[in-house]
Image (tube, rainbow, N blue to C red):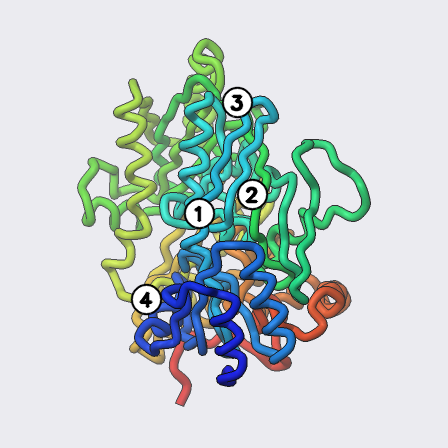
Amino acid sequence: MITDGAIGKIYSIIYDSKRIMADITDRHSYSYDASFGNYLPDLVVQPISTEEVSGIVKLANEYKIPIYPRGRGTSLSGGPLAVEGGIILDFSKWSQTLDIDPDDLIAVVSPGVITADINKAAESYGLMYPPDPSSSHVSTIGGNLAENAGGPRGLKYGVTKDYVIGLEVVTPEGEVIRTGGRTVKNVTGFDLTKLIVGSEGTLGIITEAILRLIPKPPATRTIMAVFEDIVDSGRAISNILGSGILPSKMELMDQESIKAVEEYEPLGLPIDVEAILLIEVDGHPDALKSEIVKVGEKCIDSGAREVRHAKDKAEEEELWKARKLVSPAIVRIKPTKISEDATVPRSKIPEMFRRLKLIKEKYNIHLVVFGHAGDGNLHPNIIADQRDKEEMLRVEKAVEEIFAAAIDLGGTLSGEHGIGVMKAPFMEMELGPIGLDMMKRIKVAWDPNNILNPGKIFPEPGQRLVLHHEE
């Protein structure tokens, strides 16, 4: 619990009492995110300046109070959950800075800026901010930076860390530092920028970011390829990428996700197939004419039953609408959705599909697979009912086998969702004891009092994945 003395000092740091929430009803609304679990914070504070964050962090060190940075709560790994009580720092109100510099091709942003708004502002200058997580219309850039978010365009353009060239950061002890700068090239000393991006709020609190922008491609073309065998769709991905064409997006939907979308909002998708691929290429209009034809041919050669070409922007949007509807569609099947993002090398995608089929049958679970298949970043989603303890026990075992399969194939626990609470028990499986210990040493060196986002990334001894209510 936070002492009255500490709360009194917080009111001297945050002068607007409306940005301090101690009422239990307010705190309950911050006790969960888009993942799993429910942890009630002792206090919620909404800072809007670096000075306020610095003051609160120094106070937290003095009183040994845990702090959890939070954006809009769209995390799928439990990143902002107050697992040890303490203070949640809600940055959703801090969106004052969104400056585009077209000469230097950069954007300077506050942590609470909505990610899609950055790209929208850049487009008015003919530029683009490529990272595009599916939640970009609601997620904050601060959260994306903490989790190193990706998205459909990650295949061609990379993820968040690839566009961060400078940061302002409040350290775990309340000091303010700047890393990187406004230049694309910067090799002075250790790359602290890349270390902090993706550290899930455990090494510092980002209060401002300098992001790299690129020219927006003048045109796009889209096709949908239909496959009766999901393994064939995996081969198509490898064949397309081996042909010398790098699509901007290559998204997969399996049969369960296709059926869910058609029941949710009929779009005329074929439901008698195991998978569809949605593929976008971007660049100069003349080059795209031949590229999209070649992509279609590679799909047919790989076993596609049919390839549909979008004739214009309206048809493109109609095709991509199907992919965007997957998440809201599948939660209508059962109330509990466990969303994972195990990622494998591209060449192992067909084998990962095969193993997911076996896991689905072995544990008799409702497994839906979709995601950014072009870079191996699959989203195996398990749809279940948390109230069914026996089902959730099967789900837990299935999730563990999904992670084990990804790592066995040379992949990783997470491509873009982060580790948070959900995947911490499996960290040693991927990193090994020495690799995990090296990360722990960095954490201790930066945050000796374990103030920032405790309970994330690093597993407690004997910790395991628990999705059901234990008695």
Residues at marks 3 and 4, CA–CA distance in whole angstroms: 41 Å
Location of mark 2 (residue): 160
Of mark 2 and mark 4, the one earlier in the sequence is 2
User: Image point 63% across, 58% down: which residue?
Assistant: 170
Location of mark 1 (residue): 95
* Amino acid type assigned to the residue bearing label 1 in the image: Ser
Residues at marks 3 and 2, CA–CA distance in whole angstroms: 17 Å
* Amino acid type assigned to the residue bearing label 3 in the image: Pro
* Amino acid type assigned to the residue bearing label 4 in the image: Thr
Residue 90: give x, y in percent of width and height: 45, 61
For the residue pair 433 and 346, the one nearer the viewer reads as: 433
Residue 415: give x, y in percent of width and height: 55, 50
Q: Is residue 129 above or below residue 466?
A: above
Q: Residue 411 vs residue 135: left or right?
A: right
Residues tagged 1 and 4 counted as in contact (Cβ below 8 A): no
User: Image point 61% across, 79% down: which residue?
Assistant: 64
Tell me the number on the disc at residue 195: none
Q: Judging from the image, what secondary structure is the residue with disc 3 in?
A: strand
Location of mark 3 (residue): 215
Residue 404, quarter of picture: bottom right
Residues tagged 3 and 2 counted as in contact (Cβ below 8 A): no
Of mark 3 and mark 2, the one earlier in the sequence is 2
For the residue pair 308 and 26, the one nearer the viewer reads as: 26
Mark closer to the observer (2, 1): 1
User: Image point 65% across, 64% down: which residue?
Assistant: 174
Image quarter where the C terminus lies is bottom left
Q: Judging from the image, what secondary structure is the residue with disc 2 in?
A: helix
Residues at marks 2 and 4, CA–CA distance in whole angstroms: 28 Å
Of mark 3 and mark 1, the one earlier in the sequence is 1
* Amino acid type assigned to the residue bearing label 2 in the image: Thr
Residues tagged 2 and 4 counted as in contact (Cβ below 8 A): no
Tell me the number on the disc at residue 336: 4
